[in-house]
Image (cartoon, rainbow, N blue to C red):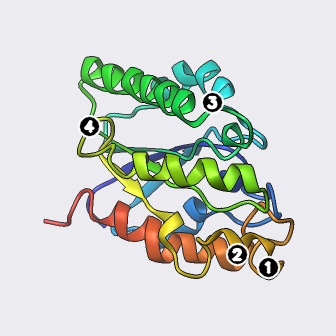
Amino acid sequence: MPLMRHLIVEGSSSSVDNGGARTTSYHTLYLPNAIHETSQQCFATDGALLADMLGRQSSVIAAFKDVPNILFVQAGQNDLRSTDTSAWLAAFAGYLATFQDAIKSSRKIVQLGISTHNPRNEGLFNVNRATADGALRRFPSEGKCDFVVDWAADPTWGPDSAAANQALYPDGTHPSQGGQSNMEANYFRPALNSLFPLT
């Protein structure tokens, strides 16, 4: 693996090792499957809202290294339980724009990625995430990020009804270990391994 990369993860409990359903998170599962040697730094915390991520954004920016960086943000899983979707999308786009400005000024190599949302066993959240995810899928073409990991598109783990299945989401919110493994193998890994191809 000739090229070192640095993976920076921001998010909430589904991105926390031993958080949520007490699982190993998709991004840690990814490391032995990376096509390049990859270091990792995770800022995600249980229950994080966008406001929490804004509060530590400068620390995330300071984590950029001189090797190619991947900054992956899993956001909205808690905000969309109650926040108006349009307001959240506007705030999230502004948050990403701050990262883009920092990337340009740092002159570091950084690929900025986001994700769609896994379901929760909550009706309002699922209504909001459907609207948000449609918009998030357009963010790369709109210049707001570089790539999207589309977990919501999964035919088994993505539907609203999946969150009521305790084999998939033990607490109706957080994916089981099988879900984290699926998130990594079928979505996260292909996306990240395509960013800096082996030459």
Residue 194 vs residue 28, the one in the foreground: 194
Q: Are discs 2 and 1 less than 8 Å apart at CB?
A: yes
What secondary structure is found at the residue carrying circle 1? loop
What secondary structure is found at the residue carrying circle 2? helix
Q: Where 116 falls versus 107 (above or below)?
A: below
Graded by Cα atoms within 10 Å as few (under 14), some (14 to 19) or many (20 or more), the crowding at tag 1 reads: few
Label 2 to label 4: alpha-carbon separation: 37 Å
On the image, numbered disc 3 is attached to which residue? Answer: 50
| Type of amino acid under label 3 | Leu
| Type of amino acid under label 1 | Asn
Label 2 to label 1: alpha-carbon separation: 5 Å
On the image, numbered disc 2 is attached to which residue? Answer: 162
Image spot of residue 181 (x, y percent): 60, 76
Q: Are discs 3 and 4 less than 8 Å apart at CB?
A: no
Tell which tag, 3 or 4, sits nearer the viewer.
3
Q: Quadrant of the C terminus?
A: bottom left
* Label whose residue precedes the other's in the sequence (3 or 1): 3
On the image, numbered disc 4 is attached to which residue? Answer: 109
Mark seen at residue 165: 1
